[in-house]
Image (spheres, rainbow, N blue to C red):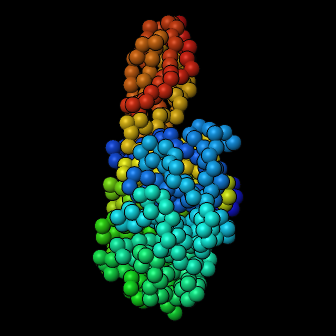
Amino acid sequence: MRLRKSTSRTATTASAVVLLAAASLTTASGAQADHEKTLTAAPLATWQTDGVVWSVEYARGVVYVGGTFDRVRPPGAKRGEKEVARKSFAAFDAVTGKLLPCAHSFTGGAGTVRALKASRDGKVLYVGGSFGRVDRTGVASAVALNTADCSLRKDFRPAVAATVRTIETTDKTVYLGGEFTVVNGLPRKRLAAFSRSGSLLPFSADIDEPVRAVLAVPDRGQVLVGGAFHNVNGRPEQALVSLDPTTGATVRSFPDWIPERSAVTSLARNGDHFYLGAEGSGTGIFDGRIAGRLSDGTMVWKDTCLGATQDLVVRNGILYSASHAHYCGLTPGGFPDGPRRHFLAQSAGDKRILHWFPDTDDGIGEGVGPRALALAGDILWAGGEFTTVNGTPQQGLTRFGTGPRDAAPQDAPRLTSDISRTGKVTLTWRAAWDRDDAELTYRIYRDGVLVATRKQRSAEWDRPEMTYTDSVSPGTHHRYTIAVTDGTNTTPRSAPLDVTAFAAK
């Protein structure tokens, strides 16, 4: 559910309350750590924007970023420092993150780039949004660039009468979806198809509200379309429909998948499965993700998380999503209602939420955090309206890789003690947590010497109390500290706890 103010919360239903404890315990004790499978939660150094990033795309070693911004700046730079002009479009080396000279100015209209999509061979980048000029060339909300030299192509220049919000490509066809009803002076209601050279094709579908996601599946003879619509080709179709890729006729419906006040924002594919992300309007309306089967149109799974999903990608059997989920209590591995968590990783096969919790703030604009995801090999790029990542200033862009560096545990615990038994010191502390490791190791030191280790699974919302009882000579004085490690990163030792062991009189 997209909320206008970050302080809004969705009330947990009575039935959910009963299951919260069980769901929490499953996460902290029974679920798999999945550290070896997920990306790390520690962000890589990344350039920043001074505004909102709406779309991110990868092609031939380059990551392209589109949005509503005027300048970009290096990693770590504050707003106004070391800025470089980039008007709603920028390009970066996909591996090093270096800013590239590929730059065009998108102005006119709303002056914003909303959609980027590379051709299947990576030679062409299609750009859509709300703009009337690219540099000094008059256009109408959709153009194409040659990725080899970043030049503006002369052949793909459709006249689109309103905002383009999504683009999809096949080997022969380019689909534009959005808010428009006229293209090249002809009726095309929210979805249009073109040849790669820009010729408008006969494909036509009558869609009553904006299209926000398109997934072409030519090997299955269909195009999946998602959005905020309620009727397609004269029939009720709530937010999701499958169309013939040549004619636009309806191929398959998905009744009862999406409730009336929910829209499909994103679509992704992995083999015979497809995945969608949704955004509800109103308290408790479906905001999560669904997995479906392309071959027969059946639902594989549906989660029940609340907090609108903006985009998703699949990598190595894991579904990564950009959202602001705040309640996943009825989804395996999930969490109770609470703070927004702006990235999620789930098992693509069974919807289980994995232990991977990098985070952003809500940011500027509508305050939903990340809005766009793209995979560049083993690096996940994310764009949006956030201004922090994992609590550190970082605006508009971030990215995550496979390591070897991962996120460190969140500080050492504070020790307390019970010395009521002769020669026994019982230490107590609350478990720490880590963004990408469910199980942590606790190292207990007495007078600077390691005396014990303990392991415990935990999550931010489920940090159990832990204890250790040390045997010492009655009446002796000792200083205890504790440190936490995920196997790669170790926290500094805690503040010391001075204890004099109890001695019987």
Compared with 218, 50 (above or below) is above
Could you tell me which residue is drawn at 52 percent across and 88 percent down?
A: 206
* Residue 43 shows in the view: no
| Residue beneath the point at 53% across and 75% down | 157
User: Where residue 85 sits in the image (x, y, percent)?
Assistant: 63, 50
The residue drawn where x is 51% and y is 81% is 191
Q: Position of residue 461 (x, y in %)?
A: 53, 45
Q: Is residue 66 visible?
A: yes
Q: Between residue 283 and residue 369, name the one nearer to us.
A: 369
Figure label count: 0
Q: Residue at x 29, y 76 (%)?
A: 219
Closest to the observer, 247 or 358: 247
Camera-side residue of 114 and 363: 114
Q: What is the x, y in percent for residue 481?
A: 50, 19
**Quarter of the picture holding the N terminus:** bottom right
Q: Does 286 appear above or below 380? A: below
Of residues 141 and 415, the one drawn nearer to the viewer in this rendering: 141
Using the rendered view, name the quadrant where residue 307 is placed: bottom right
Against 346, is 267 above or below?
below
Relative image position of residue 10 (x, y in whole percent): 62, 61
Q: Is residue 267 above or below residue 487?
A: below
